[in-house]
Image (cartoon, helix red, strand yellow):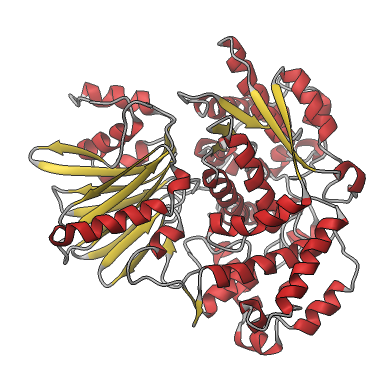
Amino acid sequence: MCGIAGFTNFRINYETNEGEWKAVLKRMNAVQKHRGPDEDGIFLREHCGMAHVRLSIIDLSSGQQPMVRREDGAEFTICYNGELYNMMELKQELRGEGVRFQTNSDTEVILAGYIHYGKAFVERLDGIFSFAIWDGAREKFLLYRDRVGIKPCFYTVKDNTLVFSSEIKGILSFPGIHAEVDKDGLCEVFGLGPAKTYGNGVFRGIREVLPGHFLEFDADGCRQHCYWQVKSLPHEESFEETVERTRYLIENAVKKQMLSDVPICTFLSGGVDSSLVTAICSENLRKQGKLLSTYSFDFKDNDVNFQANAFQPSQDRPWVDVVRDHAKTQHFYLECRNEELYDYLFEAVDARDLPCMADVESSMLYFCRKVAKQHKVTLTGECADEIFGGYPWFHKKECFEADCFPWSMDFTPRTMLLKDEVLTELPLEEYAKEAYHRTIGETPVLEGENAEEKRRREISYLNLKWFMQTLLDRMDRTSMHAGLEARVPFADHHIIEYVWNVPWSMKCHDGVVKGLLRAAGRGYLPDDVLYRRKSPYPKTYDPAYEQLVRKQMLEVMNDSGAPLCRLIDKKKVESFMRQPSDYARPFYGQLMAGPQLLAYLLQVNYWLEHYQIRLI
């Protein structure tokens, strides 16, 4: 996996100041070096420049980028981040058309495919990716992103210049672009965070290529094209046929995402999602005489401090042991201490370029760094809950009927600590409501579907466009910040397309949460694991961690120069911290309750200060 960056302007000849612009490309590479610690490269021509850092996983000896190919006197160049799972089929097809290859890399397959078939070639790609192509024949620049948005791609257009990067920090390193946040950006942070509107980069003027879209930029300007989206169609298969089809799609997704020239591992929590991915991986590796390595994560002394609640009914460790023995893996138990969890809060902001999921994200970053010492590629169980309906808000009546994002039912924590004058200036609840209704209005409908099934689709669509994107961002930034590629087989677009149209009575068969997924996993896992009640990613319940966060928040509130003091009311914070913590009332998702709210605000303060953000 890699990091990409670059710029293009059809009114500038970059080659006249070659040294200056190559220095810019090198700087864009330097700030994303964590995404590709193995190699780097730059490309500069009259109207464009590209920069690339590489984490070598496929075709270790070649495949360097940016990659140039010349056809009929024209030059075509690609800068690519991703993995192409149908590389061999496409390569064979192109060879049949007379195309010759110089490397074994998927990068060259994409570039050759574009040259041969044109910009719609992206529809043939099965993988996770963001990539840029310079088309020298047509004087055109294109930016592509995979269907689901697993790999990131940000951009801005300023003074006729398109600047792009895998991460926002790459764009901010371009001359003349400054870290500015306007009222809409603050509404994103306080009204929606740690989520953000899809396509929105939060920083003023910075956008994100939408999943399933590509940009076309030339002398006439910038145009956006959609090449994929979910479609609502009747589901005509029986439950038994649906189970078999789902099983095939999951097996196929896991197997193709095992593609790697370096050893792979899996994250194993003991829940049905990661356990199923692990079991499929392990079985396939055993056939090759190989042993799968697995990793589980927890917090030091969590067995002592754990408090069971509706969101986290049980601990993971006993279930990890069951799956480890069943799947016969080489397992590693990783633990994080309070001090590390707190310290990584701020590096997690560096990784995301935004305030994020507080200690949920900082712990993931810490664990990814540990795993990256032994492996470059891991498979995870992320995204199954969004696709198969695993979260509580798919099932609770109050969430089903709510006129708001179901993972943020209680808006009070988002406003109760802000200064009154800030609340007057920022229409937080109205901003969030508008974002919610805009997404509801985009939901693909099926003619003739009853009101209940229509609402099921709306909640599913909200999860695909919002909650899943937040977790995909978390997984990409934390893993790639550590030099680790994390793959998410459940987010395979074939699975999403199929399950999207499966009726709720099958997804939740016999009233069992994720009943379809569990039925599809029969034979791979023991039934007690398959039908274990959901327990999400672990978090710490140690009061000592909360004291660390509270102590730091008081220090920030007593520092008149802290940027957060312009936004947060000190008296409100002090009153809030005198109240007992309620871990069973999260303000975002299932994991972010009172302690995480304080940690999130500390991240906001660090973000404003470290990025030298100008509020406008």
Q: What residue is at 60 percent from the left and 41 percent from the top? A: 369
Q: How many marks?
A: 0
Q: Is residue 559 left or right of residue 81?
A: right
Q: Nearer the viewer, residue 116 or 299?
A: 299
Q: Residue 589: x percent and y percent?
A: 72, 57
Does 143 sit left or right of 453 as displayed? Answer: left
401 left or right, relative to 173: right
Q: Nearer the viewer, residue 341 or 407?
A: 341
Write the residue at 61% across / 41% down: 368
x then y, percent, for residue 317:
82, 34
Please tell me whether residue 269 is drawn above or below residue 330 in the rendered image. Answer: below
Query: In the figure, residue 127 lies in which quadrant?
Result: top left
| Residue under the image location 55 percent in, 54 percent down | 351
Image quarter hosting the N terminus: top left
Q: Nearer the viewer, residue 25 or 204?
A: 25
On the image, the x and y values in percent for residue 146 come to 43, 45
Going by the picture, which residue comes out furthest to the left?
Answer: 73
Asked if residue 184 is positioned above or below residue 267 in the image, the reply reads below
Q: Give the residue drawn at x 32%, y 24%.
A: 104
Residue 502, visible in the rendered structure:
no
Query: Left or right of 5: which side holds 448?
Result: right
Where does the image place residue 560, in percent across and percent down from the top left? 67, 84
Answer whether residue 594 is visible to the viewer in this image. Answer: yes
